[in-house]
């Protein structure tokens, strides 16, 4: 199986919404919210493909907290059938690596 992590964009919106709904049901971000995050300059959106199919994604946002930059992980989603393969961990590691390159030393996950 070939696994690839890449930037997500508006062309991926419908797939991301389907995954978000499967993962979070009634608590899922709306299509409008995901679209706004995908277009937000301060957001970082990554997806993971397995054999060419989008099977998960993560969206984080950079913001100022006090006098420093902080990373806020807004959503982390992996399709139920793809869980247990370390895909969520890989998405988080990639996002944290991007945060580090932006000199962000602290990040937190949406509760």
Image (cartoon, grey):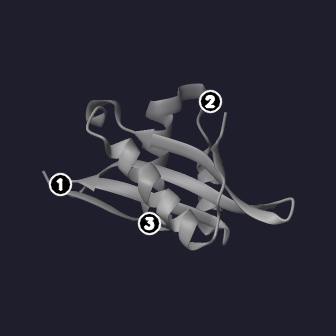
Nearer to me, 98 or 24: 98
Other-residue count near label 2 (Cα within 10 Å), few / some / many at <14 / 14–19 / ≥20: few
Nearer to me, 18 or 107: 107
Q: Is residue 15 visible?
A: no
* Dot in front, 2 or 3: 2
Rendering coords of residue 103 (x, y %): 63, 70
Other-residue count near label 3 (Cα within 10 Å), few / some / many at <14 / 14–19 / ≥20: few
Instruction: Say which quarter of the image contains residue 94.
Output: bottom left
The mark found on residue 51 in the picture is: 1
Q: Which residue is the site of mark 2?
A: 27
Residue at the farthest front position? 105
What residue is at 49 percent from the left and 58 percent from the top? 95
Other-residue count near label 1 (Cα within 10 Å), few / some / many at <14 / 14–19 / ≥20: few
Of labels 3 and 1, earlier in sequence is 3
Q: Quadrant of the C terminus?
A: top right
Nearer to me, 72 or 106: 106
Q: Report whether 82 appears left or right of 10.
A: left
* Dot in front, 3 or 1: 1
Q: Report whether 5 appears left or right of 99.
A: left
Vertical side of 61 occupied by 42: above or below? below
What residue is at 44 percent from the left and 32 percent from the top? 22
Vertical side of 37 occupied by 80: above or below? above
- Callout 1: SS: loop
Q: Is residue 28 visible?
A: yes
Of labels 1 and 2, earlier in sequence is 2
Rendering coords of residue 104 (x, y %): 65, 64
Q: Which residue is the site of mark 3?
A: 11
Residue at the farthest left position? 1
Rendering coords of residue 70 (x, y %): 71, 58
Disc 1 to disc 2, how far (Cα)?
Answer: 29 Å
Q: How many numbered discs sit on the rendered protein?
A: 3
């Amino acid at each position: 199986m070939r696994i690839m992590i890449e930037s997500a964009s508006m062309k991926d919106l419908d797939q991301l919404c389907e995954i978000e709904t499967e993962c979070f049901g009634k608590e899922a971000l709306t299509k409008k919210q995901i679209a706004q995050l995908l277009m937000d300059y301060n957001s970082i959106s990554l997806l993971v493909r397995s054999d060419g199919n989008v099977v998960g994604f993560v969206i984080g946002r950079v913001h100022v907290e006090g006098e420093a930059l902080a990373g806020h992980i807004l959503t982390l989603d992996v399709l139920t059938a793809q869980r247990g393969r370390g895909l969520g961990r890989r998405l988080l590691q990639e996002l944290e690596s991007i945060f580090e390159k932006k000199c962000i030393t602290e990040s937190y996950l949406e509760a």
